[in-house]
Image (cartoon, rainbow, N blue to C red):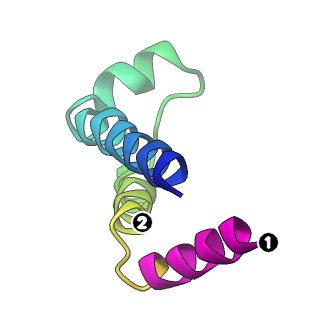
């Protein structure tokens, strides 16, 4: 269980670290990846939802229960 918890926290930290800078890189993403971003509200909306999903408090009890069931079997 400790290994799973550690891996999950590392993955969550990596998610935050990789998503937060994208708020500042709208123009660069539009230049480097074609087609350019024409609707920034969808871009920022997607980033907001993914960051919310990273920190969703309702996700933690279900994940904790699933991990405990896996470790008990």
What numbered label is drawn on residue 6?
A: none
Question: Is 64 placed above or below 47 here?
Answer: below
**Residue segment shown in magenta:** 60-73
Residue at 42% of width from left, 65% of height from top?
49
Q: Which residue is mark 2?
A: 49
Name the image quarter holding residue 11.
top left
Residue 44 lies left or right of residue 21; in this view the side is: right
Q: Quadrant of the N terminus?
A: bottom right
- Crowdedness of circle 1 by 10 Å Cα count: few (<14), some, many (20+)? few
Q: Nearer the viewer, residue 64 or 49?
A: 64
In whole angstroms, how far apart are the C-alphas of marks 1 and 2? 34 Å
Tags 1 and 2 in contact by the CB under 8 Å rule? Answer: no
Marks 1 and 2, the one that precedes in the sequence: 2
Q: Which residue is mark 1?
A: 73
Residue 59 lies left or right of residue 65; in this view the side is: left
Image coordinates for residue 22, horizontal then vertical, percent? 31, 35
Residue at the extreme right of the image, as rendered: 73
Helix, strand or loop at mark 2: helix
Magenta segment includes 63? yes
Numbered disc in front, either 1 or 2: 1
């Amino acid at each position: 269980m400790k290994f799973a918890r550690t891996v999950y926290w590392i993955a969550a930290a990596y998610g935050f670290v990789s998503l937060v800078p994208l708020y500042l890189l709208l123009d660069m993403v539009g230049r480097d990846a074609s087609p350019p971003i024409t609707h920034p509200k969808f871009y920022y909306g997607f980033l907001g939802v993914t960051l919310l999903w990273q920190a969703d408090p309702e996700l933690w009890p279900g994940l904790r229960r699933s991990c405990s069931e896996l470790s008990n079997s």
